[in-house]
Image (cartoon, grey):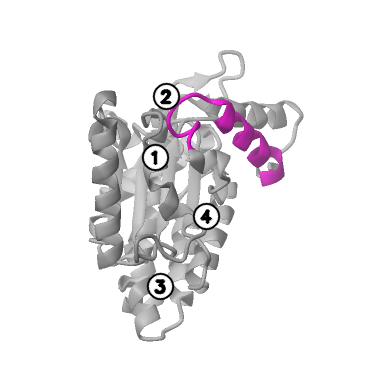
Amino acid sequence: MAGSCKASFTSLCVVSVSFFLKYQFSTDVVMRCLAKDLQTKLHGQHLVQSVVLKAIQGFVNHPESNKPLTLSFHGWSGTGKNFVARIIAENLYRDGVKSECVRLFIAPFHFPHARLVDTYKGQLREAIRDMVLRCPQTLFIFDEAEKLHPGFIDAIKPYMDHYDNVDGVTYRRAIFLFLSNIGGAAINDVALDFWHSGQNREDIGMEDLEHRLRAETMDSQGGFAQSELMSGHLIDFFVPFLPLEYRHVKLCARDAYAARGIDADETTLDEVAKAMLYVPKEERLFSAQGCKSIPQRINFFLP
């Protein structure tokens, strides 16, 4: 768990949710840690902060849920999708993404060949079943979900559906996260429209994006968009990650320097932010790479 939470909410923060459930402690401290990390470490994503916290909190606090929690993260590269997945893991499990209760699948790395889809299906079903047997509240993360082969993810659709059990195994306490770039352009269009109309980006609501994002995802090509998860309405929330602006890039640079024990001044932070590419061409409003390359780019500005 993040150091800031450990300092603020005592060492109880370093134990997993399963510890709280087993020993009948309140999960409130864990959720406070999650809320704090989302608020202080994630920049420019007010919708993510709200939706993810409420979704995780509601799921953890209601162990009798009738299905696993399934979230779909959408947005440009560098806007924080992997970062938020890691924050969730760090707050729910003592060892974070290294926990035996967390499994990351990267579509083009773990499932590269279309001709082996049937083999991958069997391997995935077995992997998920084995992990849930060991750790009922497992976190599964599917990165670059837009690159999943057609028909592949349907192999585990029963595990995410409204079943008490599948072949004697209950999956209702599992959490599935799907991360993709699908809908990124639609999200950016909404953010740009708000900017052009003089409205604050913080006024963008889920009602402005979620239905549009759901529709665009279902109209997209690929194994994730065309899967039974979509047609079966098994995604609980489509979570939009907004494009990041200059001010957010500065905050990312500040955090990157702080991680190295450096208190960077405003001039240095401006230099880092100015070195990024901003789009669209006319407005130069959004960082084309988000904050993805910031930890590496600050090396250029170190004394």
Going by the numbered disc 3, the residue's amino acid type is Ser
Residue neighbourhood size for the residue with mark 1, other residues' Cα within 10 Å, grouped as few (<14), some (14–19), many (≥20): many
Between disc 2 and disc 4, the foreground one is 4
The structure residue drawn at horizontal position 53% and vertical position 47%, both measured from the top left corner, is 235
Q: Mark number for residue 295?
A: none
Disc 3: which residue? 8
Is residue 261 visible to the viewer in this orientation of the structure? no
Q: Residue 190: percent from the left, percent from the top?
A: 66, 30
Main SS, magenta residues: helix
Residue 284 sits in quarter: top right
Q: Residue 261: percent from the left, percent from the top?
A: 27, 51
Going by the numbered disc 2, the residue's amino acid type is Met
Q: Distance between the residues labelled 2 and 4?
A: 28 Å
Q: Up-down: is 146 above or below 281?
A: below
Between disc 1 and disc 2, the foreground one is 1
Between disc 3 and disc 4, the foreground one is 4
Mark earlier in primary sequence (1, 2) = 1
Secondary structure beneath label 2:
loop
Residue neighbourhood size for the residue with mark 2, other residues' Cα within 10 Å, grouped as few (<14), some (14–19), many (≥20): some
* Bounds of the magenta segment: 205-227
Q: Give the residue at the far right of this rendering.
A: 197
Disc 1: which residue? 153
The structure residue drawn at horizontal position 50% and vertical position 30%, both measured from the top left corner, is 182
Q: Residue 97: percent from the left, percent from the top?
A: 28, 54
Mark earlier in primary sequence (1, 4) = 4
Disc 4: which residue? 52
Residue neighbourhood size for the residue with mark 3, other residues' Cα within 10 Å, grouped as few (<14), some (14–19), many (≥20): few
Q: Mark number for residue 276?
A: 2
Q: Up-down: is 259 above or below 285?
A: below
Going by the numbered disc 1, the residue's amino acid type is Ile
